[in-house]
Amino acid sequence: MPGPSHVSTAARFLFHTGVVGYMLHSYASIASVIGKALEAEYGGDLQFLTVVGMITATIAMGLSAINDLMPFPALHGAKRLVALAAMPVEITISAIYWPLILLAPQLMLPPDLAAAPEADITAASADAPLVFLPLWMDLGLHAVPAMALVIDFFVFERKYRPPMSDKVALAVAGLFTAGYATWVEHCAAINGHFPYPFLTMMSFPDRVKVYAGSAVFALLVFRGLNALHK
């Protein structure tokens, strides 16, 4: 099978580096919008699944860019393993975020403490001013990672085969979910609230259902996309 042409290599590299640049710029700009809300918060912005997922996606795209210039089987294998976690997680983030942000933003966004210092960050009040992100930043955090990973998968990658597509995918979904759930519960125990108001409003059993449901959704998304891949 012939190797990629210089043009296709350049196109892949530009795509991967462009995505990484956009995501990192969006992430670096978070502080200017929600920095006040996160002051003195244990865990900082790493409490947010959005940020954890975006970091994972950035690593996957970054490894892809390096592999574009210096193809190496071990490097490509590492990228595929990271992408195996990042792609379904990012799609799950987008699937949760956009319906809530459009229909019930008070369940997703923290109150704007700069505009209303007396606001209770633990409250999900429809009357409290909320921290909305600029659209370009919102897309960079909650849409571009998922879209870029799907494009990368279908255009530049081959489908996953067993054991990666079954046992490894199941293990990755379980470990990622358990890791984030443990981390966010730990942060909430110290901060007195969760980064997402809808989690603060829930009982522990209900949050467990959300964590488990998200893991199952992510796994089904991966299996569906992998089945569609030629």
Image: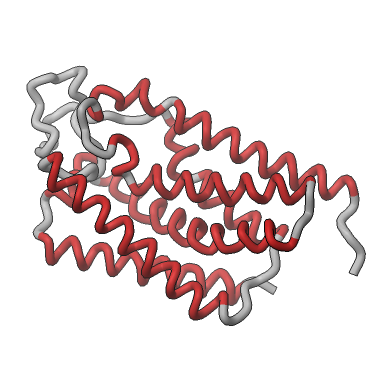
In this view, the residue in front, 201 or 163, is 163
At horizontal 30% and vertical 27% (from top left) the residue drawn is: 34
Residue 211 location (% of width, % of height) = 27, 63
Residue 158 location (% of width, % of height) = 70, 68
In the picture provided, is 158 more to the left or to the right than 103? right
In this view, the residue in front, 219 or 70, is 70
Residue that extends furthest to the front in the rendered view of this protein? 74
In the picture provided, is 28 more to the left or to the right than 37? right
In this view, the residue in front, 101 or 83, is 83
Q: Quadrant of the N terminus?
A: bottom right
Q: Quadrant of the C terminus?
A: bottom right
Q: Is residue 153 above or below residue 192?
A: below
Q: Is residue 209 above or below residue 38?
A: below
At horizontal 76% and vertical 49% (from top left) the residue drawn is: 68
Determine which quarter of the picture holds residue 30: top left
In the picture provided, is 65 more to the left or to the right than 97? right
At horizontal 23% and vertical 27% (from top left) the residue drawn is: 37
Residue 206 location (% of width, % of height) = 15, 64
Q: Is residue 153 above or below residue 5?
A: below
In the picture provided, is 122 more to the left or to the right than 211? left
At horizontal 47% and vertical 68% (from top left) the residue drawn is: 221
Q: Is residue 121 above or below residue 164?
A: above
In this view, the residue in front, 124 or 65, is 65
